[in-house]
Image: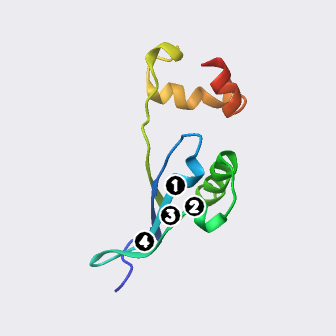
Amino acid sequence: MQNLSPISLIYGIDFSGSQEACKKIWICESIPTDEGLLVNGCWNLKKKCKNISRDESFEILTRIIAPSSEAVFGLDFPFCLPKIITDETNWTTFVKNFSKTYNDPYDFRQKC
């Protein structure tokens, strides 16, 4: 199978933001081919990284996603918040202003 795309890897991440998120995050790695996707592997983050906390699981995901300029990521989690906790007029503005409004996830939780 030949890789026809400039994208070298495609990841699907089944994500959970719960307190036990590290137990429920699954990652699937595949490569695009002329016949579709070829799955290289699928793993549970908790089983692969052993005893990690919720925050550590988020840090690991960040380290996987941030430097990956030749990969595409699909994340399965809701991109929504109740309107009452944000003053932004739309989702794009909320995302662009997030780091200006909140110092870290804890700050976000406290202010919401």
Q: Nearer the viewer, mark 2 or mark 3?
A: 2
Q: Residue at x 43, y 22 (%)?
A: 90
Q: Find disc 3 in the rendering and name its residue.
A: 71
Q: What kind of element bears circle 2?
A: helix
Q: What kind of element bears circle 1?
A: loop
Q: Is residue 55 above or below residue 87?
A: below
Q: Find disc 1 in the rendering and name its residue.
A: 25
Numbered circle sitting on residue 9: none
Q: Position of residue 10 (x, y in %)?
A: 44, 65
Q: What kind of element bears circle 4?
A: strand
Horizontal side, residue 57 vs residue 70: left or right: right
In the image, 92 versus 43, the foreground residue is 43
Say if residue 68 shows up in the picture: no
Q: Find disc 4 in the rendering and name its residue.
A: 30
Q: Nearer the viewer, mark 4 or mark 1?
A: 1
Q: Give the residue type at disc 3.
A: Ala
Q: Earlier in the sequence, mark 3 or mark 1?
A: 1
Q: Residue at x 65, y 46 (%)?
A: 54
Quadrant holding the C terminus: top right
Q: Earlier in the sequence, mark 2 or mark 3?
A: 2
Q: Earlier in the sequence, mark 1 or mark 2?
A: 1
Q: CA distance from mark 3 to mark 1?
A: 19 Å
Q: Position of residue 68 (x, y in %)?
A: 58, 62
Do the residues bearing badges 1 and 2 touch, measured as CB atoms within 8 Å?
yes
Say if residue 13 shows up in the picture: yes
Q: Give the residue type at disc 2.
A: Leu
Residue 23 in which image quadrant: bottom right
